Amino acid sequence: MIPAYKVRIHEGRRGLIVGIANDQSIAWGCAKAFRALGAEIAVTYLNDKAKPHVEPLAREVEAPIFMPLDVAKPGEMEAVFETIAKTWGRLDFVVHSIAFSPKEALGGRVIDVGRDGFLTTMDISCWSFIRMAHLAEPLMTHGGALFTMTYYGSQMVVEHYNIMGVAKAALEAAVRYLAAELGPGGIRVHAISPGPLATRAASGIPEFDELLEKARTKAPARQLVTIDDVGLATAFLAHDAARLITGETLYVDGGYHIID
């Protein structure tokens, strides 16, 4: 169910949401929030297997653009942005909510990660955001906002997060550099760092249930963040009220990251 808001602060704006896998995805929380606040949404799905799970959600947000996007497949990212250019002619925001590491890379020690596993992790989890920013820039002629999703394991060693923590640290550094480079054109760039969420992507992390319980008991708010919390925080940062905020890693985690 898309919530209803009387103030549609993103009326007339258009954005791309990448990373919806199902109705528990962080990207879905973002899509719901932006749509409820008036924005028009383009939605992508990973492949034919994922399409039946994502298509009903795309219909729910009335997405006029619904396309496959596997960032590991040459040309698919470019095709999405070409379609946006032809259909809309501009873009106001992008939400990049994808990450991947092969099981053998994610499950082992960082020091043991093979080159192929490392490169795949970095390519999908970090470089794809840089490439999306490159493709979005020409469409953001009147400024815009770019978002990616990160996690506390980028800054602190989190058990079982392993090589993904390395990739997220690189991603956060990329956010800062992109913010500096794109800022003169009115384009803002942020990393959103939610607390642990029970998403399909997170289920690949060993002993994730223990991580969820730790977050619930240690966070000052004493509760877990939801995809709707993340979506609304992201939508706020895309608004003109946040026009002078850029290059940040925003924690949406009930304060968990401030506790030792």
Image: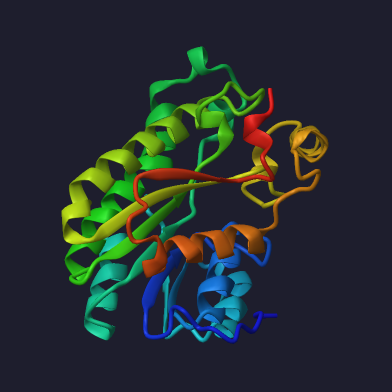
Tell me which corner region of the image, top left, top right, bottom left or bottom right, holds residue 68.
Answer: bottom left
194 shown above or below 60:
above
Residue drawn 44% across and 20% down? 114
Vertical comparison of 102 with 2: above or below:
above
Q: Nearer the viewer, residue 124 or 132?
A: 132
Which of the colour schemes (rainbow, by chain, secondary structure, one colour) is used? rainbow
Residue at 57%, 65% (x, y): give it: 232
Q: Is residue 155 left or right of residue 187?
A: right
Q: Quadrant where the N terminus lies?
A: bottom right
Q: Is residue 47 visible?
A: no
Give the residue drawn at x 32%, y 69%.
Answer: 80
- Seen in the image, is 211 located left or right of residue 69? right
Residue 124 image position (x, y, % from top left)? 41, 44
Q: Residue at x 49, y 54 (%)?
A: 97
Quadrant (top left, top right, bottom left, bottom right) of the C terminus: top right
Residue 174: percent from left, percent from top: 32, 39
Q: Residue furthest top?
A: 111
- The answer to whether residue 96 is above or below residue 250 is below
Q: Position of residue 203 (x, y in %)?
A: 69, 44
Please give left or right for residue 39 compared with residue 215 in the image.
Answer: left
Q: How many marks?
A: 0
Image location (x, y in percent) of residue 238: 41, 65
Looking at the rendering, which quadrant does residue 115 occupy?
Answer: top left
Q: Nearer the viewer, residue 180 or 127?
A: 180
Q: Is residue 37 visible?
A: yes
